[in-house]
Image: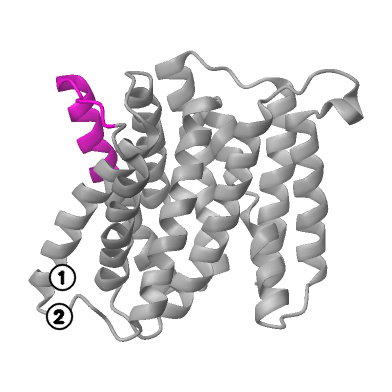
Amino acid sequence: MILSALGFATMTACVKLVGLRGIPILEIVAARALVSLIISYADVRRKKISPWGHHKKLLATRGLVGSLALVCVYYAVTTLPLAEATILQYLHPIFTALLALLFLNEKVRRSTLLCIVLSLAGLLIMVRPSFLFGASMSLPALSVAAALAGAFGSALAYVIVRQLSQTEDSSVIIFYFPLITLPVAVMMLGDGFVMPDGPALALLLLVGLSTQFGQVFLTKALRAEEAGRATAYSYVQVLFSMIFGWLLFSELPTWWTLAGGALIVAGALANVLGKR
């Protein structure tokens, strides 16, 4: 899971870098999907298994949910400091708990309630909305909304992946994500394509490769271990993102970000430890 976190942190840094070179978000999503689709299909062929799986509708749903969440995440990454964008993604335990309550009739544990309280407090501290702090928001409202939408989509995708992992090969699950994402991104992009130069093309390729790296280890971790235990190690991605933000973009997290981020991560870890 730590290797997965490093892969995804590298991916977000590359997304931000290529976004600064004028490449549209949807084009970045499409490029990532194209690279992942080629690698995923080769992996399926290597295993000599059918790429279509057993539960096609659920696999396609996972791909669609993931593609829409990805657009939101990439928008947040390109419009927010890297550390803040990454930390906001770790609000997904809140959405996971709500989804489990609504659709799986699972009871909300005390640890989950603690997670919700800490995460919401951390969100308020990071964003500092004007109606509470009496000043302008510290982060753009649209970017924060996109990050929250991405966190919700990630939570839904994790739930679906966990269910699919019981019957589907990990390579098939991974294959469906770019299979659905690529046509969705191309249709949404329309005539907004921008021809990338050499450095931008290299970054787009690296986005796809680092994503595939992270996705492979994420799926294997979720297949080998309970989702809660596996994802506990993913929070090191916040540290990786802070390092990349500092080295590549001269971004230093504010004390508000550190305090709010600490509460969000603490809440997520409390939820994981409570389940154990």
Q: Residue at x 73, y 31 (%)?
A: 126
Q: Which residue is under mark 2?
A: 49
Ranked by sequence position, the earlier of labels 1 and 2 is 1
Element at badge 2? loop
Q: Is residue 13 above or below residue 274?
A: above
User: Taking 100 as reference, is 121 left or right?
Assistant: right
Disc 1 residue crowd, few under 14, some 14–19, many 20+, Cα 10 Å: some
**Measured from the top left, where is residue 230 in percent x and y?**
49, 64
Q: Residue at x 73, y 75 (%)?
A: 101
Q: Residue at x 68, y 25 (%)?
A: 139
Q: How is the image coloured?
A: one colour
Foreground residue among 2 and 38: 38
Q: Amino acid at mark 1?
A: Val
Q: Which residues are magenta?
A: 193-210
Q: Amino acid at mark 2?
A: Ile
Task: Say how many tags the image has.
Answer: 2
**Whole-Å distance between the Cαs marked 1 and 2?**
6 Å
- Asked if disc 1 and disc 2 are in contact, CB closer than 8 Å, the reply is yes
Foreground residue among 197 and 267: 197
Predominant SS along the magenta part: helix
**Measured from the top left, where is residue 1 in percent x and y?**
42, 56
Q: Which residue is under mark 1?
A: 44
Q: Is residue 232 above or below residue 136?
A: below
